[in-house]
Amino acid sequence: MNGSIYLKKLLLFCCCALICFPGIANTGHISLKRAMISKTISVNATSLGGYLGTKNLKLSLTNNTDKEMTVDIDPGLIFRPADTNYQDLVVMGNESIVLKPSGSEDISLQAFCGKSYARGPMKDMSYRFLKQGDSNMAKTLTYIKTNNIDVHVAQYAVWTFTNGFCLNTVYSHDHVRESEELIAYMAKLKKIKVPEYYMENKLEPTNGLPVIVAGQERVYATMHWGNEGYKHMYLVVLKQDGTRYKQIEADQVIDKYGYTVVVEFNPKVDPAGIYIVQLHDDNHKIWGQKVVTVGIRPCDMQ
């Protein structure tokens, strides 16, 4: 009996709280995607003139209700410009903005290019919401934000979802470990093999020009090792037929994880074909081997 009386008093208190403090009852969270589809809010989207992971998309939001709401920005929302010769913009997301009843606010969002072959957006270009990327894209963008991944590496990751780029293009030679960790995370999401080598595209930072500079890509193979008990370790690059192409003495490069060596191939200098990168010691014991393809762009690792 006492329990029943207590429950009735609790319910009465809750009802009174909702009546006496309408702000508590009216304040709630809603995703930006859901708010746009339901027309709970109106959105005017314009570019700020930047791209490649900068805060380059301005949303002017208007609350169409008489209730205060917190709008949560979904990761992977894609906005398309009126002029489709220019970039779609893919929102990083995972941030929020509060809208007062019938109020309006602006928010500048970090976004990436959605079309590698298109031009960087000019300032004040009009955009509209197109769609949201798949769940793997959303998870990847959340990982990128949480781990503060370099914006260039993040941009390469976005293109694997929007343009079908190979997983081995999610790479920057300035951020080797960061790139490899993101690739491993994405490979697990996509349920595919982690690539043995990488390709980095050169990006054009100027607005109004194609984002990728054609013909400037580089191919990289990385080797990592710890203390194997030998004074010297060597990297040798072999041609597909097993003949030696070049050798690199690699016992002087070290980072906090151990030894790391990055072997670079330039498609303008190194002939197209298949190469074998081997790590061996003074006794010619092979500690690691990777097969690298130069001059062929298909996703052969996928």
Image: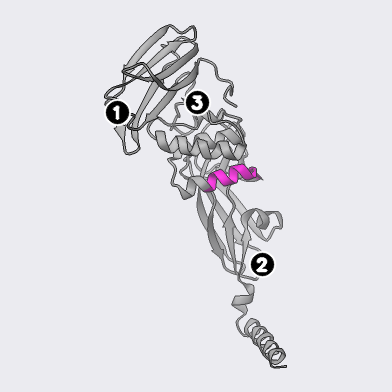
Q: Which residue is mark 1?
A: 253
- Residue 194 placement (x, y as % from top left): 54, 31
SS under mark 3: loop
- Residue 222 placement (x, y as % from top left): 41, 26
Separation of residues labelled 1 and 2 (CA atoms): 61 Å
- Residue 197 placement (x, y as % from top left): 48, 24
Dominant SS type (magenta): helix
Foreground of the two, 294 or 103: 294
Quadrant assignment, res 288: top left
Local crowd at mark 1 within 10 Å, few (<14), some, or many (≥20)?
few
Local crowd at mark 2 within 10 Å, few (<14), some, or many (≥20)?
some
Pointers 1 and 2 in contact (C-beta within 8 Å) = no
Residue 196's tag is 3
SS under mark 1: loop
**Of label 1 and label 3, which has the lower sequence position?**
3
Q: Mark 2 or mark 3, which is nearer to you?
A: 3
Is 137 magenta? The answer is yes
- Residue 268 placement (x, y as % from top left): 43, 13
Question: Compared with residue 24, is residue 100 higher up or lower down, i.e. above or below?
Answer: above
User: What residue is drawn where x is 38% and y is 19%?
Assistant: 285
Residue interval drawn in magenta: 130-142
Residue 65's tag is 2
* Quadrant in which the C terminus appears: top right
